[in-house]
Amino acid sequence: MSRTLFIADLHLCQQEPAITAGFLRFLQREATACEALYILGDLFESWIGDDDPNPLHQQVAEALSALTIPVWFIHGNRDFLLGKKFAARCGMQLLPEEQLLELYGHRVLIMHGDTLCTDDAGYLRFREKVHQPWLQRLFLRLPLWLRQKVAVRLRNDSQQANQTKSQQIMDVNQQAVEAVMERYQASLLIHGHTHRPAIHRLTVSDHPAERAVLGAWHQEGSMIQVDADGVSLIAFPW
Ligand code: LP5
Ligand code: MN
């Protein structure tokens, strides 16, 4: 079937087994009937290292590696530490934070979406810190229990910080969207992160363009399909 699928923001964790079950069903039903699957970040609620023996990770790795289509992964703000080792166990390829695809005659730019939220200065400062390679290396050398503790602390701080931020600050900045699409001459941008599923129309370099936003899997599944007819956003029960 000539279609390519995109998902993001599943936030898989042991506390939400129904979402994991829905993801495994999605892999069997949908991902077997497409050309490629792109996971645009926040597949996991948090990631503290490929050496975490969490059985959920093994379950996901087995299901993904059973697929015969190519699977690609872009890091999110929760699972930016997911490394080559775990990717190899899943049989998926890691992509840089921005990737241009040529699909069925469309120039499609894909990313997680957090870097488009340029009004969220607090987040961008946080991101810059935790993306420093030396800090990541240091963190990954800590014992697992301590990494776990840091992750819980960061999640709590983040939730608290988000309560004081406006919805507008936590959405994408329109200038940032237009600038990155112009840079790649993309007619379609696909991202997640904001949890505001929609297909927006806009103009980029005087041409009509679209921005397709994936939904989070909190209440239902969300995927974006690209084929020769264009882009569609599909919600489905897990
Ligand atoms: O994730 P979500 O939806 O709650 O909010 C995000 C932004 N928050 C984050 C933080 C993550 O949730 C934390 C994930 C932990 C992953 C595993 C640990 C790995 C540690 C690695 C160390 C090298 O991404 C949130 C955005 C929101 O999206 C909307 O876009 O607003 O941003 C924040 O909340 C950031 C705050 O503004 C500042 C957070 C305070 C933390 C300060 C500590 C900084 C020092 C870090 C050094 C370890
Ligand atoms: Mn995110």
Image (cartoon, rainbow, N blue to C red):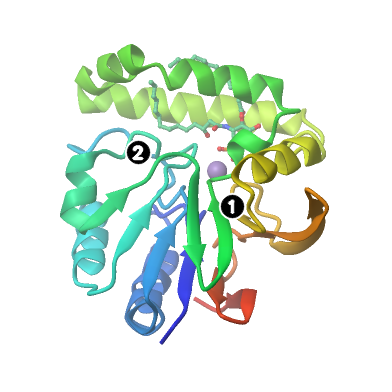
- In front: 212, or 26? 212
What residue is shown at x 65% (from left), y 53% (from top)?
Answer: 195
Task: Report x, y in % for residue 48.
Answer: 31, 33
Q: Is residue 34 above or below residue 162?
A: below
The quarter holding residue 157 reads top right
Task: Report x, y in % for residue 55.
Answer: 21, 54
The tag on residue 97 is: none
Counting residues from the N terminus, which is met first, the one under dot 1 or under dot 2? 2
Can you tell me which quadrant of the image ligand 2 is in? top right
Q: From the Cβ of disc 1, is ligand 2 less than 8 Å away?
A: yes
Task: Report x, y in % for residue 50.
Answer: 22, 39
Task: Report x, y in % for residue 132.
Answer: 40, 16
Q: Work out which quarter of the rendered image holds the N terminus and state it.
A: bottom left
Q: From the Cβ of disc 2, is ligand 1 less than 8 Å away?
A: yes
What residue is shown at x 59% (from left), y 17% (from top)?
Answer: 125
- Judge whether residue 54 can be spotted in this image: no
- In front: 59, or 69? 69
Q: Residues within 10 Å of mark 2 (few under 14, many from 20)?
A: many
Amino acid marked by disc 1: Gly
Please name the residue that numbered disc 2 is placed on.
Answer: 47
